Amino acid sequence: MKNADLAKRLVELLGGKENIVDAENCMTRLRVTIKDHSKVRGEDIKNTEDVMAFMDTDEHYVQIVLGPGKVRDVMAECKAMGISEKTGTGAATEDWQANKAAVQSKQNKNVVSKLRVIADIFNPMIPAFIAGGICNGFGRVIKILMANGTLPTNAFTNVTYNIIALIGVAFLSYLAIFTGVNAAKQFGVSPMLGGMIGTASTNAAIGQIAEALGWESFLSANAGGIIGVVVGVWVLAKVEKWIHKRMPSALDITFTPLLSMLIVMPLFVLIVMPITGVISVKISEFLNIFILSDNIIVSVVTGYLMAALFLPLVLFGLHRGLTPLYTLQIGELGGTTLFPAVAQAGAGQVGASLALWLKAKRVGNKRLQGVIAGGLPAAILGIGEPLIYGVTLPMMKPFVTAGLGAGFGGAYVMAMHVMTASTSPSGILAVTHTLPQYMLHYVIGILISYVMGAIITYFAISDDDVRAA
């Protein structure tokens, strides 16, 4: 189906433009906020050509899995039809203003909705994480090859290395600023003010303030990391909205942002950063008890559980909420051991799907074969949603067996203390940003997850289940 026709069809099945508050897309899913759930024709959406899966996340939020590439094109068509793109403010239309209180009252009771806000801060950063992560990995390899003489050190290799390194640092070095901008969008305040909070957290002036107060032991630039930035922007949003309601319209554009920053910046530097800094250190120390344990049993069990239990987070779109934990490790250790372990979850999906493909071929389920064949390439490269929502989750049992198989890969990479320098991409491409001394171990972990996911699924799922899928 053409993208324009698909977008038109989906809008119709979602109850029409007037029933859609706003929409956005991630790598594989179209996420839509709706007003009246009774107008959504979920079964018809599931049966629409090119739709891999449909999910009712909650009463006012649905997700439609279309796959990588396709979802972005369909979102563009929706925007052309006048559908508002999600901005994070929760107020895309005038009608939404009337329904805002009712929607928020429901969402505030929904723990998943609250947690999803954190994930949504980082979801728009996925392309930059991928580009920066891969270039960071390639840059490390080039530097090693230049240092040991395998690559000549000349103008060409120096320029090449530095350009690749620039791509790596252009995003990751300023992650706090990008986090501030996206957090502001989610909390409904000016993105530029959020960016100011992120910038302030990295500025050398923080060190001068700490020295003047004698707080060097718990206040410094980057104290609290992106956790502190998110909390700081949340405080900013609360203060800005309070001032905005009380500021005369003629003075609002000038004095609301000024007063907001004058109030919030001292609170951020003197309270939020020190507190979140201490909390971040304690979280990191707690994680390291398990993640960096010298006890092989502890490492194996930790890695297994992380990989095996990661898929439910992906299911609710909450997996990006782990990004602050990854960055804590990267800041402290120069790499993260948490990410390589949870990345095995996608490999378990690949193995499970391969087993299902073999069974589908045997029992003659060509539809399932086609869905698996369409989702496998993306899954191998680290985008697992098409297989999750199109294959394993609808059947449910393979969703479980995939996690059980992935746990073995997670146990292996955790036992080997495998580290990556970034948090995207996952799948086999993660080897590009795995620290060189761990690359082979990461690949072995992926292969273990493939094999175990396939074996467990093959013997746990009956032919009848596959035939009926």
Image (cartoon, grey):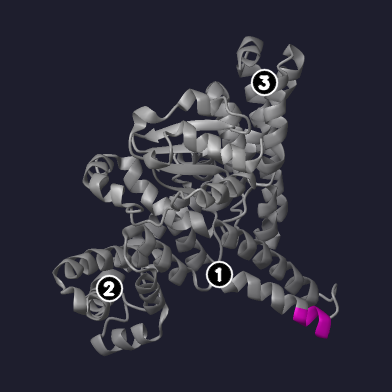
Mark 1 lies on residue: 171
Q: Position of residue 392 (x, y in %)?
A: 58, 27
Q: Tell me: 398 left or right of 367.
A: left
Range of magenta residues: 154-159
Is residue 350 covered in magenta? no
Q: Residue at x 48, y 38 (%)?
A: 11
Q: Earlier in the sequence, mark 2 or mark 3?
A: 2
Q: Quadrant of residue 251?
A: bottom left
**Residues marked 2 and 3 touching at CB (< 8 Å):** no
Q: Tell me: 243 left or right of 302.
A: left
Relative to 310, residue 248 above or below? below
Please identify the quadrant where the N terminus is shown. Answer: top right
Is residue 155 covered in magenta? yes
Question: Which element is circle 2 on?
Answer: helix
Q: Position of residue 61 (x, y in %)?
A: 39, 39
Task: Tell me if residue 241 can be seen.
Answer: yes
Mark 2 lies on residue: 268
**Is the stretch drawn in magenta largely helix, strand or loop?**
helix
2 vs 3, front mark: 2
Question: Which element is circle 3 on?
Answer: helix
How many other residues sit within 10 Å of disc 2, few (<14), some (14-19) or many (≥20)? Answer: many
How many other residues sit within 10 Å of disc 1, few (<14), some (14-19) or many (≥20)? Answer: some
Q: Residue at x 35, y 73 (%)?
A: 193
Mark 3 lies on residue: 458
The amino acid marked with disc number 3 is Tyr
1 vs 3, front mark: 1
Q: Position of residue 234 (x, y in %)?
A: 29, 62
Question: Which element is circle 1 on?
Answer: helix
